[in-house]
């Protein structure tokens, strides 16, 4: 799968650093016949994307079924959101509790990483996270002395494990939270189960909520830039991922909103406070558990401390973006990745640093057609000038090339430029809010002059509704401007703003 890259991934995980899956329609017909894509929402509280390279749709579906079954099996053990799960039962007791071998293994991994990171990674944050969540409701940040007291209590092993007896016992009253490492443990196990069920597969790529594990390939994967949280932002770098994992963490996009302030949702277990000196970190590692433990830790340590930790690990590399936007890389990161060329905007008539932002809220719970499963909508966003000439296709969301033409208004002109279609097409998105920006360049990278423009949005959902003519006119001159588009069955609202870039 070399050459033209059958697919390209851009990872923007909304739970942590926020990388979204983006699939390019670049395969030859022969390659495409071996690539099978599956997408689900509401898996472990987020979205799942699976790509299998194998001959035969039945074998790909066997892989899909195996992945979903393994995820559900382990969810019943490890999910803190399920009151009937084994981790939830353990959180309700201070006595030894008989648990599955998988939970014993995850708890052992948390202890291993707590020691290796000097306490910067810890699985005992359940109580602290609850305090921060409550603070959002009350408007008052948690008492630092209370946080410090809890931090002292969790500065040590979380549980007593008896592998022979199959039991675990909590050592402190502070609740366990194994969601992060648990999700990546599930990723690893699901991939392992899929390979065992379909050994003839030559490549598998699995992404849950942006955390990626792969085998075969190599797959071209983009690493999102935490300095640019927009959904269609250019990635920081690309890498070719074979057998291994890529995870990213950071609190720059997901925060606790308390009393008019925003605190990153990255907690330093040593203090209980929000960690603020790193925007985000990405890690390449042989397995997703290692990658996740390290990417989370790098958001707590200083960049220098983080790079020292990475230097002590075999076959692991990382990039850290600090709070000031400076980039810190391990020596091997530049060997394993390549930077993404960013088009330089020439000087034009727009005021300096002005752009058009489009905040799109896809309906979170649209009703599917009777007897049909919910499908993520396909979306196209483009811009026309006052003469109704298309100047820029901003982004297109759609997993399957065969369904892209169903965005019929956009396709009527875009189909004439397949290179453009391939460049802008990304994966579909789950219901939720997204921010897209137009930087003032046309499709050929040339700056647009001041003037009146129209932003068009087309949404089409299989077994749902097709809205072709959502459009808002906005003057792009010397002053900020804005327009809102009304909600409908597929979109909760669209806000279009012209003005200075958000700092």
Image (cartoon, rainbow, N blue to C red):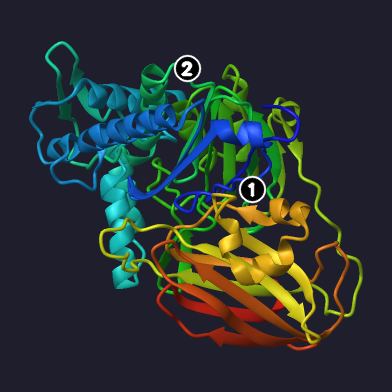
Of 81 and 150, the residue lying toward us = 81
Give the residue at x 65% y 37%: 29
Q: Few, some or many C-alpha atoms within 10 Å of disc 1 (few <14, some 14-19, many ≥20)?
A: many
Mark 1 highlights which residue? 322
Q: In this picture, is 462 found above or below 180?
A: below
List the residue tagged with mark 2. Answer: 200
Left or right: 350 in relation to 301: right
Q: Which mark is residue 394?
A: none
- Where residue 172 appears, x then y in whole percent? 19, 36
Residue drawn at (63%, 85%) of the image:
472
**Position above or below: 180 against 386:** above
Q: CA distance from mark 2 to mark 1?
A: 43 Å
Please state if 198 lies on the left or on the right of 318 as rendered. Answer: left
Say which label, 2 or 1, has the lower sequence index. 2
Q: Position of residue 303 (x, y in %)?
A: 62, 39
The answer, for residue 148, to whether it is visible in the render is: yes
Instruction: Tell me if I can see residue 230 in this picture.
Output: no
Q: Toward the viewer: 41 or 301? A: 41
In the image, residue 475 above or below residue 128: below
């Amino acid at each position: 799968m070399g050459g033209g890259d059958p697919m390209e991934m851009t990872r923007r995980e909304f739970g942590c650093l926020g990388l979204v899956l983006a699939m390019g329609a670049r395969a030859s017909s022969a390659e495409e016949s071996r690539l099978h894509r599956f997408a689900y929402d509401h898996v472990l509280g987020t979205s799942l994307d699976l790509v299998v390279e194998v001959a035969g749709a039945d074998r790909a579906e066997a892989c899909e079924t195996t992945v979903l079954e393994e995820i559900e099996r382990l969810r019943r053990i490890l999910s803190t959101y399920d009151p009937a799960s084994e981790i939830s039962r353990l959180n309700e007791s201070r006595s030894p509790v008989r648990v599955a071998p998988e939970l014993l293994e995850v708890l052992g991994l948390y202890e291993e990483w707590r020691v290796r990171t000097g306490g910067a990674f810890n699985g005992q944050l359940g109580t602290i996270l609850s305090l921060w969540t409550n603070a959002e409701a009350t408007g008052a940040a948690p008492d630092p002395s209370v946080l410090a007291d809890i931090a002292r209590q969790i500065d040590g092993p979380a549980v007593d494990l008896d592998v022979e007896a199959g039991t675990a016992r909590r050592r402190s009253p502070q609740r366990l939270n194994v969601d992060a490492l648990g999700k990546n443990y599930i990723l690893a196990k699901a991939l392992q189960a899929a390979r065992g069920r379909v050994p003839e597969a030559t490549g598998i790529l699995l992404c849950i909520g942006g955390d990626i594990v792969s085998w075969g390939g190599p797959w071209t994967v983009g690493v999102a830039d935490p300095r640019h949280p927009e959904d269609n932002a250019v990635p920081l770098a690309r890498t070719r991922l074979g057998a291994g994992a890529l995870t990213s963490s950071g609190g720059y996009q997901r925060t606790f909103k308390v009393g008019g302030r925003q605190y990153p949702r990255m907690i330093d277990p040593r203090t209980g406070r929000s960690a603020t000196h790193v925007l985000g970190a990405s890690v390449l590692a042989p397995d997703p558990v290692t990658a996740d433990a390290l990417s989370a830790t790098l958001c707590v340590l200083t960049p220098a401390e983080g790079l020292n930790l990475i230097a002590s690990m075999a076959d692991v590399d990382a990039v850290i973006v600090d709070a000031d936007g400076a980039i810190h890389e391990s020596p091997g990161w530049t060997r394993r990745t390549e930077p993404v060329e960013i088009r330089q905007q020439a000087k034009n008539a727009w005021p300096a640093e002005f752009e058009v932002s489009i905040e799109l809220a896809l309906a979170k719970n649209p009703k599917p057609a009777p007897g049909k499963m919910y499908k993520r909508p396909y979306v196209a966003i483009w811009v026309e000038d006052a003469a109704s000439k298309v100047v820029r296709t901003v982004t297109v969301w759609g997993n399957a090339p065969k369904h892209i033409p169903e965005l019929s208004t956009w396709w009527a002109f875009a189909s004439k430029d397949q290179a453009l279609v391939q460049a802008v097409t990304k994966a579909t998105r789950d219901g939720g809010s997204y921010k897209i920006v137009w930087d003032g360049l046309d499709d050929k990278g040339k700056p647009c002059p001041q003037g009146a423009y129209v932003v068009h949005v087309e949404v089409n959902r299989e077994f749902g509704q097709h809205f072709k003519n959502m459009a808002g006119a906005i003057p792009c001159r010397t002053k900020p401007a804005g327009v809102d588009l009304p909600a409908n069955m597929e979109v909760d609202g669209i806000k279009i703003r012209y003005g200075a870039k958000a700092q």
